[in-house]
C-alpha cells in the first residue's frame, strides 16, 4: 500500500469527473497518479471538503460524518484495495466504541469521508501499477507543454481502458 493525497478533480473528454490520487512522498512530476472516475455530485462533495469549504446545507458525506460522530465513530483510514474490470473497490476503517470495523464502500464515498475526517488514504500497489498514469502528465502547473499533453491524454482516455 502507498499513502496518497487527493491531488484534485479533473474532467475527461466526455465531461466525466475524475479524482486524482498522488502518492504523498512523490515529488511533482514523479511517480504515478491514480485517476478514479466518480459522479458529479461525489466530485463536488470531495472538492468542497478538500478546499475546506462549507456547503449551505449538509451534503451526503457531511451527513455521514455527523452520523458517525454522533455514534462515537471516526474514520481511521481509507484503502483503495483493488480494481476489477475497470471498477475500483475501497474499504473504510472505522474506530468505533466497540472496536475497529472495516466496511466495503465505493471509492467516491470513501474519499469524501476521508477528506472530511482528514483520514489517511492508501492505495494498493497493484492498483497504482495497473491504473496509474505518469505523474508528469498531471503535474502541469508550471509547464504549458505538459498541460497540453495531459489534455490530450484526457481526450482519449476511457474508464474501460482500465478493465483487466
Image (cartoon, helix red, strand yellow):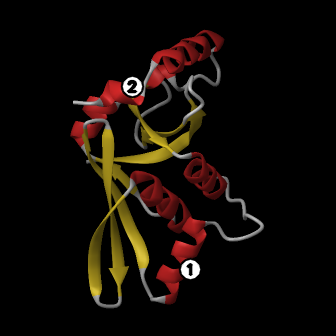
Is tag 2's residue or tag 1's residue first in the polypeptide sequence?
Answer: 1
Query: Which residue is painted at 60% across and 9% down in the image?
Result: 145
Label 2 and label 1: CA atoms lie apart by: 35 Å
Query: Which residue is painted at 45% across and 63% down in the image?
Result: 119
Query: Which residue is painted at 47% across and 80% down in the image?
Result: 68
The correct choice, above or below, for 120 with respect to 32 in the image is below
Q: Nearer the viewer, residue 17 or 81?
A: 17
* Label 2 environment density (alpha carbons within 10 Å; few <14, some 14–19, many ≥20): some
Give the residue number, with chain letter if any, for mark 1.
66
Image coordinates for residue 35, horizontal then vertical, percent: 44, 35
Camera-near label (2 vs 1) is 1
Q: Nearer the viewer, residue 56 or 123?
A: 56
Query: Which residue is painted at 52% across and 25% down in the image?
Result: 138
Give the residue number, with chain letter if any, for mark 2.
133
Residue 31 is at least partly visible in this image: no
Mark 1, secondary structure of its residue: helix
Amino acid at each position: 500500500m502507498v499513502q496518497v493525497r487527493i491531488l484534485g478533480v479533473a474532467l475527461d473528454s466526455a465531461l466525466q469527473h475524475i479524482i486524482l490520487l498522488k502518492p504523498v512522498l512523490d515529488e511533482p512530476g514523479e511517480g504515478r497518479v491514480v485517476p478514479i472516475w466518480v459522479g458529479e455530485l461525489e466530485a463536488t462533495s470531495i472538492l468542497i471538503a478538500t478546499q475546506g469549504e462549507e456547503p449551505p446545507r449538509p451534503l451526503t458525506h457531511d451527513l455521514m460524518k455527523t452520523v458517525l460522530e454522533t455514534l462515537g465513530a471516526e474514520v481511521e483510514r481509507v484503502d483503495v484495495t483493488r480494481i476489477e474490470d475497470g471498477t475500483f473497490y475501497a474499504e473504510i476503517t472505522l474506530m468505533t466504541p466497540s472496536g475497529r470495523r472495516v466496511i466495503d464502500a465505493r471509492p467516491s464515498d470513501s474519499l469524501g469521508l476521508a477528506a472530511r475526517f482528514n483520514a489517511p488514504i492508501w492505495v494498493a500497489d497493484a492498483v497504482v501499477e495497473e491504473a496509474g498514469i505518469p505523474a508528469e502528465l498531471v503535474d502541469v502547473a508550471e509547464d504549458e507543454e505538459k498541460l497540453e499533453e495531459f489534455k490530450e491524454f484526457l481526450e482519449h482516455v476511457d474508464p474501460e481502458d482500465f478493465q483487466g
